[in-house]
Amino acid sequence: MQRYFVNAGSENDRYLIQGEDFHHITRVMRMKASDQIVCVTNDGKSAECIIEEITDEKVVAKVVKWEEGSTELPIKVSIASGLPKGDKLEWIIQKGTELGATEFVPFLAARSIVKWDDKKAEKKVDRWQKIAKEAAEQSYRNMVPNVISPLDLKTLLQKADDYDVKLIAYEEEAKLGEGAVLAKTLHELRLGQSLLVVFGPEGGLDTKEIAILKEHGFIACGLGPRILRTETAPLYLLSAVSYHLELLR
């Protein structure tokens, strides 16, 4: 059943769907009155709904049954990616959303090849947010991850103060055979806590960045014995979180 994210407020258990979702329902899916969809509110609740009315501008969906449970990870995981080149960040956002990430935080790392254009920033971030929304609908999420505009390292460190646990995925630790930090961290995490993990761009994080991050409470960890690409490492981390906190419990 197709899922759509709607505003939390409703009138008599009815939701109005407009804009791109209206177009998707009427033009792409070619749905009609009496067809069923799932509406997900921005406070994480979902309901099976029936399309009650379709006008030229909106779809009216009526709640039939509220769903129980949630598909969200038991902790909040934010992925901070050193801005990579090409469409790699789009891949991270799409697949990371499917795997349960709560937020994506691009940042301008020392080795980031891409030069961020502030003039195109709003359009770029809007595209990233749309990718997250579509991936959240496809993967039956109860929330759409937030994607923010790229930060510099100083601003990232300020943001990091809001998290319970902070890690650095560092390839040099993997080369040295370090394999205990991630497992220990996941074992000690408690339901509802927040985790921020920093990943470098192509070429990784430089030693100065690692030192600064450690000074601000980040712990470096390896992600197994193999060296992963910048777009693969976040997916490994999210898969490990899911396995440890969902499948093993």
Image (cartoon, helix red, strand yellow):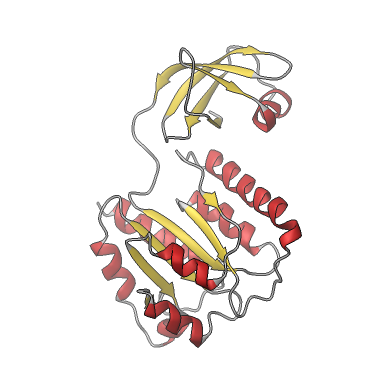
Q: Is residue 172 left or right of residue 231?
A: left
Percent of width and height locating residue 31: 66, 20
Q: Residue at x 57, y 63 (%)?
A: 106
**Depth order, front residue of 231/20:** 20
Q: Quadrant of residue 180?
A: bottom left
Q: Residue at x 71, y 28 (%)?
A: 23
Percent of width and height locating residue 69: 34, 34
Q: Is residue 187 above or below residue 228?
A: above
Q: Quadrant of residue 4?
A: top right
Q: Quadrant of residue 222?
A: bottom left
Whether residue 233 is visible, yes or no, is no
Percent of width and height locating residue 94: 58, 52
Q: Residue at x 71, y 19 (%)?
A: 57
Q: What count of labels does the image hold? A: 0
Percent of width and height locating residue 41: 47, 31
Whether residue 77 is visible, yes or no, is yes
Q: Residue at x 38, y 75 (%)?
A: 216
**Depth order, front residue of 107/222:** 107
Q: Is residue 197 left or right of residue 57?
A: left
Q: Is residue 74 left or right of residue 85?
A: left
